[in-house]
Image (cartoon, rainbow, N blue to C red):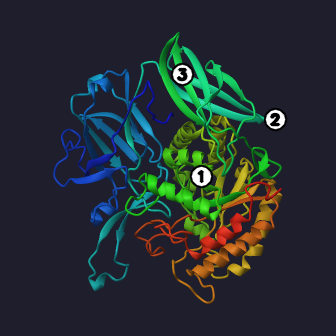
Amino acid sequence: MLYPIMTTTRNLIDLSGVWRFKLDDGKGIENGYFKDRLYGKVYNMPVPSSFNDLIEDKEVREHVGAVWYEKEFELSKGILNEDRVVLRFGSVTHKAVVFLNGKEICRNKGGFLPFEVVLEKDMLVNRNRLTILVDNTLDNTTLPVGGVKELDNVSKGLEELMIPKVKRHIAYCVDFFNYSGIHRPVKIYTTPKEFIKDITLITDIVEEKGIIDYSVQASFDGDVFVEVIDKEGKNIATATGKNNRIEIENAKLWEPGAAYLYEIKVTLKDGDKILDVYYEKCGVRTVKVEAGKFLINGKPFYFKGFGKHEDSNSNGRGLNEVINRKDFSLMKWIGANSFRTSHYPYSEEIMRLADEEGIVVIDEVPAVGLHVNFMNTYMGIKSSQSTWEVLKTKEQHEKDIRELIKRDKNHPCVVMWCVANETALEEEGSYAYFKPIIDLARGLDAQKRPITLVSHIAYPLNTEEAHKVCAELDVLCFNRYYGWYWGVGEVELVEGVIVKELEMWWEHHKKPMMYTEFGADTVNGLKETTPVIYSEDYQQLYYEVHGRAFDKMEYFIGEQVWNFADFATRYDSIMRVGGNKKGIFTRERKPKMAAYTLKKRWEQIPDFNYKK
């Protein structure tokens, strides 16, 4: 899916700003909220943003179910005269039903990827009313997986104390807050009747030549003219045809920390008549897994970085260009070169910024929570439930993989696809579920990037089912919390455990391995003379010990800390005080002591050839 831009043949309108907002009372559809202007208890709500933290009302913050957004707009005669007028949503969490002037025009399920609908001319009037029903309910068919449960604050056996009963509906989605709303921009763009539908780029490096194989999909079987423009604005290569190869002598490569982007100008013509023009950025680089190494441009790459979240004060998960800029600056300051989009696709704006800044990305679908026995695995308890019989996520999982790869396929920053995080890998049925998912992702990506799936520690660890899934992957990624959830307070003892487990996986699969999560909750400012849990001293020691273990492993290709910054979590859990505190930076983006520990380590580790 092409990102909406303005060109000589395309117009663009951003509907971001203040919308009208109303909680649904369970009867919004029945009462026809979409038929007329929203009325009653209506708030002003900025778009994009999460609605949860923007109104000082517990009912709003904890709302589970439907809400309504409304925006009125007019279109100029110039826009109305365009052949195609398209309404596009960057993301709506997690389900959306879209009404225009009281009539339903589209609906979407999935909270982290764009969707769009063509606005037919007979739908539009002088002043248009756009109404969106947004539903944040999670269940066993959604990604993330979640649910709604009714809580009672009276423990069994204490009824005689006459404590008032309070029943609440709580959405749960593992260990991050279920921020909801219209999280990314809502835009209207236009195209000519005959237009460029999609562009696919595949790059290679042969000797000193940069190779760009391109494919253009268009609605019209006309002529396609392609130009390559360098950073100085010079046209350095041309080609014709919907499918062709372009060779660039002495090409400048896209590399971590040293990004170089060419601009690909695609023109669709009918003879001498220009029908449509679109620009796509292109970074010439290669990605390959070979002999236990992860190669970018043929050189062994070492991942240094973070698991992150789209999360900031007040804004929640809404697009925040200022925070994105700050986060990239902090990543470069600390010596990081990469992050994972845990646990969902991030905004297109973040991906475009990563391209520009030379930050490497592991791109992940929102397949988190696929484990109905997750807590039991912590305690070594065998459950009678089967995750793969209870969950009904396959349809949504395949939809998200298709849409993620379609959206992000041309980004040079994306070097690996992650198809799930911390699933019931050890349970019977996981191979039957994931084999088609992995094959789908592999078949969809023209660049043939490596595929991974992030595993967690489970008991039993060494199951045949888990090994069958791992055999299908290109890189083994581990979330491990030795010294925190296991051996808490005894981090000095876990170095040998880390090495022993990694040796086991290498012996079984002979594949490159990396940690995609490891960390310890830390209260900013808590200092101790001896390292105790929650102190900054303990967090520093934690990363020092892990670094020593990682350096012993020849085929260990990277370390991504959990987490970049403290983030919001569920508010009904006594495990978290004000959110997850495993951040190297506070939620306000201030460094903890461990930031300097990691900075010292990572600045001494080169991006390439650290593990030769």
Residue farthest to the left, as pictured: 40
Circle number at residue 267: 3
Label 3 to label 2: alpha-carbon separation: 30 Å
Which residue is depicted at the point 57% across and 69% down? 584
The amino acid beneath tag 3 is Thr
Q: Where is residue 463 shown, x and y percent of the image?
A: 72, 60
The amino acid beneath tag 2 is Glu
Quadrant in the picture for residue 237? top right
Pick whichever of labels 3 and 2 is earlier in the sequence: 2
Is the C terminus in the top left, top right, bottom left or bottom right quadrant? bottom right
Residue at which label 1 appears: 420
Q: Where is residue 326 shown, x and y percent of the image?
A: 50, 59
Whether residue 407 sits left or right of residue 160 in the image: it is: right
Pick whichever of labels 1 and 2 is earlier in the sequence: 2
Visible residue check, residue 352: yes
Query: Are dots 1 and 2 in contact, CB under 8 Å?
Result: no
Can you tell which of label 1 and label 2 is closer to the viewer? Answer: 2
Mark 1, Cα crowd under 10 Å, few <14 / some 14-19 / many 20+, is: many
From the viewer's side, name the closer residue of 231 and 173. Answer: 231
Can you tell which of label 3 and label 1 is closer to the viewer? Answer: 3
The amino acid beneath tag 1 is Ala
Q: Is residue 8 above or below residue 378?
A: above
From the viewer's side, name the closer residue of 80 and 143. Answer: 80
Mark 2, Cα crowd under 10 Å, few <14 / some 14-19 / many 20+, is: few
Residue at which label 2 appears: 207
Query: Are dots 3 and 1 in contact, CB under 8 Å?
Result: no
Whether residue 279 sits left or right of residue 570 in the image: it is: right
Whether residue 303 sits left or right of residue 192 in the image: it is: right
